[in-house]
């Protein structure tokens, strides 16, 4: 199962949601891989801490390999490095991805991520893909490679307006490249139940028939501590309200439809 976490808007929690769901997946015994396609490297830093700076080989190396003819290439498995957390591996990002994007687009390497992850299907039970805050080459590559798409929503009117264009873009990728791609749902993030605006926005989306997932993720300063210490919530404080919400969201996603 390959899930992409995608939103063209920045600051909606893509990396946080990716890493926390992946950490819970790994804690449940699933062999889990995080693929960090964002040149900002947030997921890489979240899972590796200070070791992120020297994380090689990384995804820039993998994509660069596709641009050159070599007698012997690294096996795809070599790019999936272990993290400090059991069952959880990472394909690390690099700022060099930004430099490579134009070359990869011009050489039409849009299917290379899909091909690479197909080589890892027997090595991992769950793959979570973090994406940049833009509909660019790497995001399209992720949507082409994935089975399911999760869309973070941060209870903001600008985010609400952007959802329709985002869903249209996913539909286009599905029609042109990946007919199996499903929108698994919209993840309500940074939710404040005592504030009226977030509740109004979420209710409006529900009334419009959008696929809002039933577990909302609360706004909490604890998540900043989680980032700083490079520990997903399940490892920082398993009993915290936000940890329980992430677990409920994960369990909902893993429950077979009736």
Image (cartoon, helix red, strand yellow):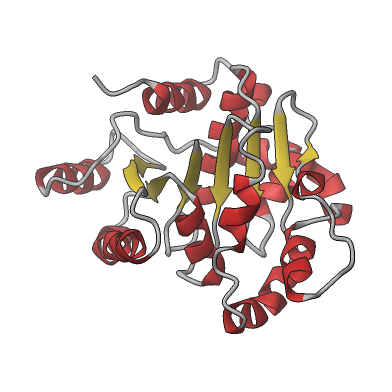
Q: Is residue 185 left or right of residue 82?
A: left
Who's the residue at 72% across and 36% down the image? 89
Residue displayed at 48% across by 22% down: 247
Left or right of residue 229: residue 248: left
Q: Furthest residue to the front? A: 71
Q: Residue placed at 34% from the left, 38% from the top?
A: 192
- The number of numbered discs placed on residues in the rendered structure image is 0
Q: Nearer the viewer, residue 251 or 14?
A: 251
Counting from the top left corner in percent of width and height, residue 120 is at: 66, 41
Which of the two residues, 126 or 167, is positioned nearer the viewer here? Answer: 126
| 220, above or below 183, in the image | above
Q: Quadrant of the C terminus?
A: top left
Q: Position of residue 221 (x, y in %)?
A: 55, 38
Of residues 239 and 21, which is closer to you in this image?
21
- Which quadrant would residue 217 be assigned to in this image? top left
Residue 246 sits above or below residue 97 on the image: above
Image location (x, y in percent) of residue 132: 55, 62
Q: Quadrant of residue 238?
A: top right
Q: Is residue 99 above or below residue 258?
A: below
Residue at x-position 34% and y-position 60%: 170
| 258 horizontally vs 247: left or right | left
Q: Whole-percent x and y of residue 57?
A: 84, 55
């Amino acid at each position: 199962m390959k899930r992409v976490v995608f939103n063209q808007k920045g600051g909606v929690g893509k990396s946080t949601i990716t890493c926390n769901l992946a950490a819970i997946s790994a804690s449940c015994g699933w062999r889990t891989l995080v693929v960090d396609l964002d040149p900002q490297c947030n997921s890489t830093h979240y899972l590796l801490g200070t070791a992120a700076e020297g994380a090689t080989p990384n995804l820039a190396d993998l994509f660069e390999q596709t641009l050159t003819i070599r007698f012997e290439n690294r096996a795809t498995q070599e790019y999936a490095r272990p993290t400090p957390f059991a069952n959880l591996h990472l394909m690390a990002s690099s700022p060099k991805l930004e430099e490579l994007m134009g070359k990869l687009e011009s050489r039409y390497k849009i299917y290379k991520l899909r091909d690479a992850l197909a080589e890892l299907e027997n090595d991992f039970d769950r793959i979570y893909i973090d994406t940049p805050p833009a509909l660019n080459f790497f995001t399209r590559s992720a949507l082409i490679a994935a089975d399911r798409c999760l869309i973070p929503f941060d209870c903001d009117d600008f985010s609400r307006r952007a959802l329709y264009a985002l869903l249209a873009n996913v539909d286009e990728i599905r029609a042109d490249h990946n007919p199996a791609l499903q929108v698994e749902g919209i993840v309500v993030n940074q939710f404040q139940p005592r504030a009226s605006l977030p509740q109004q926005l979420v209710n409006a989306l529900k009334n419009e028939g959008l696929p809002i997932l039933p577990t909302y993720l609360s706004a909490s300063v604890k998540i900043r501590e989680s980032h700083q210490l490079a520990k997903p919530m399940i490892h920082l404080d398993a009993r915290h309200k936000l940890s329980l919400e992430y677990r409920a969201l994960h369990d909902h996603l893993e429950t077979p439809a009736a």
